[in-house]
Amino acid sequence: MAVDIGGTKMDIAYVDETGAFYKPPERLYVPFDEDGIADLDKMLDMLEPYVVFARENLPNFLGAGFSICGNIDDADGNCVLVANLRWYNVPFGKMAHERYQVPIYAATDVRMALIAELLWGKAKGCNYVAWMTLGTGYGGYLFLDGKLYGGYHGFAGNLGHAIYDERGGADCGCGQRGCFESYVAGPAIARQGQAAADEGRSALLKQLSQKDDGKVHTSMVFEAERQGDPAAVKIIEEQVRKLGISLSSMVDLLDLEMIVMGGGVLKGAADFLDRVDNRVRGFLMTVEAKRDLKIERETFDNSALMGAAATVFIKNNILEL
């Protein structure tokens, strides 16, 4: 069984060792308390029927893999920092195991997604890969010299919380100011679009926002950009530029052969990833990197789910990277 806990919703799937899966049709949303903190007890209540079903009905059930959008200690499933859920040192793995009485394997969603790409996707056979997600947040995980690489604390690849501008930047959910995530992730694009609409810099965004009582969404900014709205064009151009800066810096530092990107923001424009690719190559230092680097769209729409399931099989020596 696999569960992907994102910044706003939870997806569930039952997966076998070949990657074949069944995904229940229900859409579950992360429950938040009145202070805007994700309510773990309610979350475990919502997921319990699915765990019970797996435990009682799936042959050779091995446990549940959880991918979570933040800094997770994969040794024990402790959520060290999950900015979008406002979790700090939440013992998720321990609490889930105590509740469900099944083996629990929890890790950051980008690690899980990378595992799926390495086993079944475009990164199969590669040795130096970064998997990056751009959606509610912005971050990644690394595969270096043929091994998953988490660094000393297990948080390597957390590019979204590298600082772009600590003085003039926006506040970030992690508690810092000016992180790349606060400029390039979906909520940041929506926030900038909202400001353009509210300040009278974009009549089109103001018009589009009336679909939701004056609230601007990321998709509306991309729609306005497609229609040539100057404010929206500038917002997306700046987003792509900052993505180019962050990703090229990572490639120059690690000499990567491939970046695989996923996340909802990539769906905003058909040529969005091509634009990011061009920006990255423009900033790269070496001719070799400009020539050889591959930037690919994720193979699967549910990479984190598949990787969470794959982790269960890896931990039980049924699959290996």
Image: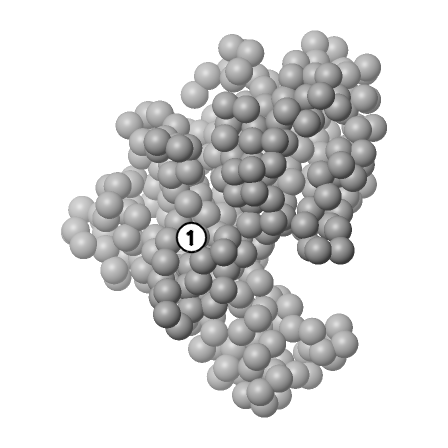
The quarter holding residue 105 reads top right
> Which part of the image, by quadrant, shows the C terminus?
top left
Residue at the image position 65 percent from the left and 73 percent from the top: 216
On the rendered structure, is 318 left or right of 140? Answer: right
The amino acid at mark 1 is His
> Which part of the image, by quadrant, shows the N terminus?
top right
Above or below for 103 versus 47: above
**Residue 316 locus on image (x, y percent):** 55, 11
Above or below for 127 versus 181: above
Residue at the image position 37 percent from the left and 70 percent from the top: 167
Disc tally is 1
Per the image, the residue denoted by label 1 is 161
**Residue 258 locus on image (x, y percent):** 34, 41
The quarter holding residue 202 reads bottom right
The quarter holding residue 313 reads top right
- Between 272 and 115, the one lying in front of the other is 115
Residue at the image position 39 percent from the left and 42 percent from the top: 157
Give the secondary structure at mark 1.
Answer: helix
- Between 297 and 309, the one lying in front of the other is 309
- Between 180 and 98, the one lying in front of the other is 98
